[in-house]
Image (tube, rainbow, N blue to C red):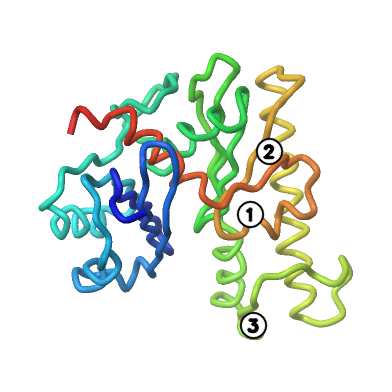
Amino acid sequence: MPHAEFLLIDNSNSFTKLALSSLDELGPIRRHSTRELDARAIHRLIRGWRFDGVVLSSVVPVKGDLLARTLDDWPMLRVDAWTKIGVGIDYPRRGSIGADRLANAAAAPKFYGAPVVVVDFGTAVTFDIINRQKKYVGGVIAPGLEAMTDYLHQRTAQLPKIRLLEPPSAIGKSTKHAMLAGAVFGYRGLVREIIAQIRTELGARRLTVVATGGYAELIAAGLEEIDDVHPNLTLEGLRIIGALNCEEY
């Protein structure tokens, strides 16, 4: 993709992803630790890329402002709750909806129809619900998987920091394996129960559930309730939003 319509930026708490995009498809993707993001890193990340405008989703205000300042040579769309996203919003305080969640809401019905739930396994795990009328109607926020295990390590004297992977069994034979079982199997239980409650409240016989985010593959592997894993769903949503709004910025 020698020249792209958009530079898409998903600025989340742990990592910032950048992608080139045409109106119709994603191009190459690069990522960087959000904590270590600075102007020099931004210039390095876009080196060699040519694009007409920027679509920015940020849930880290300080870094979002840094990105906006650093890339102010290009027209920029900063996604917020008043941006046209292609689905309705039926939510009392729409200004409180994170830009990444809006991007997920834009993408999910395009790929999976409606009703659909997006489960985004990031620093927090978020559930975003689009009803059969293709309206964003709300969501759920819970602590992220890594946040839970890090909390145990930080607040106890003898529990180690662990690398998250599939536990060998539900009955741990070591401290590490016991923590993995509690984290992974416990987290799947949390996700399963939340999805069941959402399905009941929507009254939906058919409800597609798609997972995205860093631990989506790990958790979805043991959950029949999750229909698909789409690693780049948020970026696809930014592409869709960019295409919907490209004449306005």
Q: Are marks 1 and 2 in contact (CB under 8 Å)?
A: no
In-front residue for pair 209/144: 209
The amino acid pointed to by label 1 is Ala
Q: Residue at x 55, y 54 (%)?
A: 213
Q: Is residue 245 left or right of residue 191?
A: left
The quadrant where residue 37 appears: bottom left
Q: CA distance from mark 2 to mark 3?
A: 29 Å
Name the residue tied to disc 2.
194
Residue 239: image location, x then y, percent: 39, 40
Disc with the residue nearer the chain's start (2 vs 3): 3
Which residue lies under the disc numbered 1?
A: 216
Q: What x and y, as percent, mark residue 201?
A: 67, 21
- Would you place residue 236 above or below residue 123 in this image? above
Task: Estimate the spatial distance between the alpha carbons at disc 3 and disc 1, rounded to whole Å.
Answer: 23 Å
> How would you rate the neighbour count of disc 3 (Cα within 10 Å): few for under 14, some for 14-19, many for 20 or more?
some
Viewer-closest of 110 and 214: 110
Q: Disc 3 designates what residue? A: 160
* Crowd rating for badge 2 (residues with CA inside 10 Å; few <14, some 14–19, many 20+): some
Residue 12 to residue 236: above or below: below
Where the C terminus falls, by quadrant?
A: top left
Which quarter shows the N terminus?
bottom left
**190 lies left or right of 12:** right
Tell me: 94 left or right of 124: left
Q: What kind of element bears circle 3?
A: loop
Which label's residue is closer to the chain start, 1 or 2? 2
- Amino acid under disc 2: Ile
**Which is more N-terminal, label 1 or label 3?**
3
Residue drawn 65% across the image and 48% down it: 229
Picture layout, residue 69 above or below residue 36: above
Q: Residues within 10 Å of mark 1 (few under 14, many from 20)?
A: many
